[in-house]
Amino acid sequence: MQPAPVSLREITADTVIAVVRLEVAQHQKGFVASNAVSLAQALFAPEAWYRAVYCGDEPAGFVMLEDESLLSPLPSHPTVGVWRLMVDHKFQGRGVGRAALQQVIEHVRAKGLFSSLALSYVPGPGCPEPFYRGLGFLPTGKMDGVEVVLELPLAVSAPR
């Protein structure tokens, strides 16, 4: 059976409750904030770019970027990072997170403004480090509090 296509969609008044109800597995709850908390933070962060992750027509996850190119005035060297990525426990192990993050990478790359895409994770058993490393993210040697920072180098098409 062909897996359902993964897409990133804007969250609407009709879909927000379904997105808020999505949850990671119990043992993963220490790795990512709830979608309700993420959406509340996005309300107060003009640099937040966020989408629901869909598998076919079903909400399956959430992704949020911290994209400084959305700020006004535009910083001279804007940066971008994955602020949140979660896949509901019912959709894990089906390639949904990988497909969603690949779409995010293409979205960021298409802007032509960034030399890299950053993200961070909380280390520990079951952490997403192998998943991120498998997509080409590399250690930076930096920490963000207790989180390990990784970066994916991007080809920059626009002059800097």
Image (tube, grey):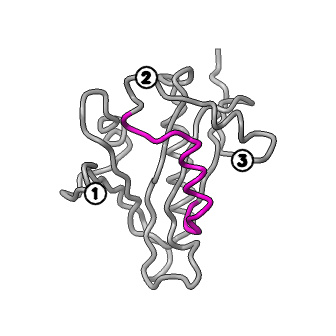
Which residue does the image show at 56% across and 48% down from the upper left? 103
Tell me what residue is drawn at x 50 percent, y 53 percent. 105
Q: Earlier in the sequence, mark 3 or mark 1?
A: 3
Task: Say which residue appears at 57% left-offset and 63% top-offset.
Answer: 110
Of 35 and 62, nearer the camera is: 35
Q: Which residue is rendered at x = 37% and y = 53% of the image?
A: 119
* Three-letter code, disc 1: Asp
Left or right of 141? Residue 9 is: right
Left or right of 39 on screen, residue 76: left
In magenta, the rendered stretch is 30-48
- The disc placed on residue 144 is 1
Instruction: Give the residue at mark 3.
Output: 11
Left or right placement of residue 76 versus residue 35 in this view: left
Query: Disc 2 on helix, strand or loop?
Result: helix
Residue beneath disc 2: 26
Q: Which quarter of the rendered picture does the C terminus lie within?
A: bottom left
Q: Residues within 10 Å of mark 2 (few under 14, many from 20)?
A: few
- In what quadrant of the picture does the N terminus appear? top right
Looking at marks 1 and 2 on the same chain, the residue that comes earlier in the sequence is marked by: 2
